């Protein structure tokens, strides 16, 4: 659990739901695992109907070309980027596959097509305006890590958008309207202001932070702690300073 650099929530204003913001990149294997663990924790959390989840964009490496070298061999791609041997890269990925399986996910790194994730984030930003933030995150994660879909191809993103109820024209708007690029950039800038340097990162009520794909039990503990604090701040009686008043059906007080 991390302390955030900036705490912008005004707790003098009572909130109907406790907000949880999740910064992630659709091409981050730990983000999908973190999503599943968070969902498992939320399923065990009695106050889940009082939780409002907001997904946020975070590009781990904006410098990656849309079609980078070794895009069809993620083991070689990571080995080259991290300066490790091919064998070490394979071993690292095997460990992640095991983590994913423990979370109920089926990763196929042999199918993964490495690409720049900006187009995916533009689609995410548009989907959020339609109340489809969780659905688009899930579909893109599954497409990338399990199905080996090429997220640099507009037609593929159109297909994935259709799977969650978006039309061809809506996906085209997402990929061409600069509004959704700016929204993705704004999320990244906000992450920087909060001191977030890696994903997944879960910000709870702008008071608590969870970094990485934490185990379900750990996430549940933080949820419980944060929710208890949120309930207290949103149920405290008003602090009243007495002054002269008028009340219905009576004279005004002197």
Image (tube, rainbow, N blue to C red):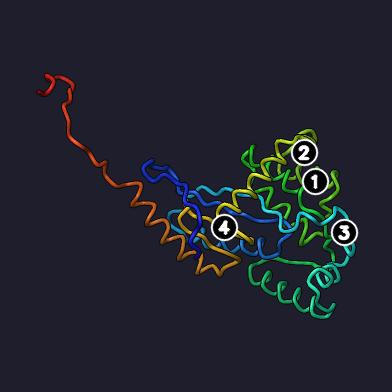
Residue 223: percent from the left, percent from the top? 46, 60
Rate crowding at label 4 as few (under 14), some (14 to 19) or many (20 or more) other CA atoms within 10 Å: some
**Position above or below: 99 against 253:** below
The residue at the far left in this view is: 254
Q: Residue at x 75, y 76 (%)?
A: 92
Residue at which label 4 appears: 195
Q: In the rendered image, which quarter contains the C terminus?
A: top left
Would residue 20 be found to the left or right of residue 233 on screen?
A: right
Rate crowding at label 3 as few (under 14), some (14 to 19) or many (20 or more) other CA atoms within 10 Å: some
Residue 214: percent from the left, percent from the top? 57, 68
**Position above or below: 177 against 245:** below
Residue at which label 3 appears: 68
Would residue 254 be found to the left or right of residue 99 on screen?
A: left
Residue at which label 2 appears: 171
Q: Gap in Å between the C-alphas at discs 4 and 1?
A: 31 Å
Q: Residue at x 46, y 63 (%)?
A: 222
Which comes before the other along the chain, label 3 or label 1? 3
Residue 83: percent from the left, percent from the top? 81, 74
For the residues labelled 1 and 2, say whether their Cβ atoms are less than 8 Å apart. yes
The label shown at residue 157 is 1
**Position above or below: 170 against 46:** above
């Amino acid at each position: 659990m991390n302390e955030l650099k900036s705490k912008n929530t005004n707790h003098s204003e009572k909130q109907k739901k406790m907000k949880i913001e999740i910064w992630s990149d659709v091409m981050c294997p730990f983000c999908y695992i973190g999503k599943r663990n968070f969902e498992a924790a939320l399923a065990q959390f009695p106050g889940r109907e009082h939780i409002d989840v907001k997904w946020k964009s975070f590009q781990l490496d904006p410098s990656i070309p849309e079609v980078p070298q070794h895009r069809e061999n993620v083991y070689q791609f990571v080995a080259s980027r991290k300066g490790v041997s091919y064998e070490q890269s394979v071993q690292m990925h095997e460990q992640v596959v095991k983590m994913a399986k423990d979370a109920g996910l089926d990763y196929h790194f042999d199918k993964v097509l490495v690409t720049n994730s900006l187009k995916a984030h533009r689609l995410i930003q548009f989907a959020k305006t339609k109340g489809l933030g969780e659905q688009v995150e899930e579909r893109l994660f599954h497409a990338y890590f399990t199905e080996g879909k090429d997220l640099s191809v507009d037609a593929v993103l159109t297909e994935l958008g259709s799977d969650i109820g978006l039309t061809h024209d809506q996906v085209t708007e997402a990929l061409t309207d600069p509004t959704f690029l700016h929204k993705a950039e704004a999320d990244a800038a906000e992450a920087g202001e909060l001191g977030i340097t890696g994903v997944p990162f879960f910000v709870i009520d702008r008071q608590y932070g969870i970094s990485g794909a934490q185990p379900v039990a750990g996430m549940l503990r933080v949820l419980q702690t944060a929710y208890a604090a949120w309930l207290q701040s949103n149920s405290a009686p008003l602090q009243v300073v007495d002054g002269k008043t008028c009340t219905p059906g009576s004279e005004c007080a002197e």
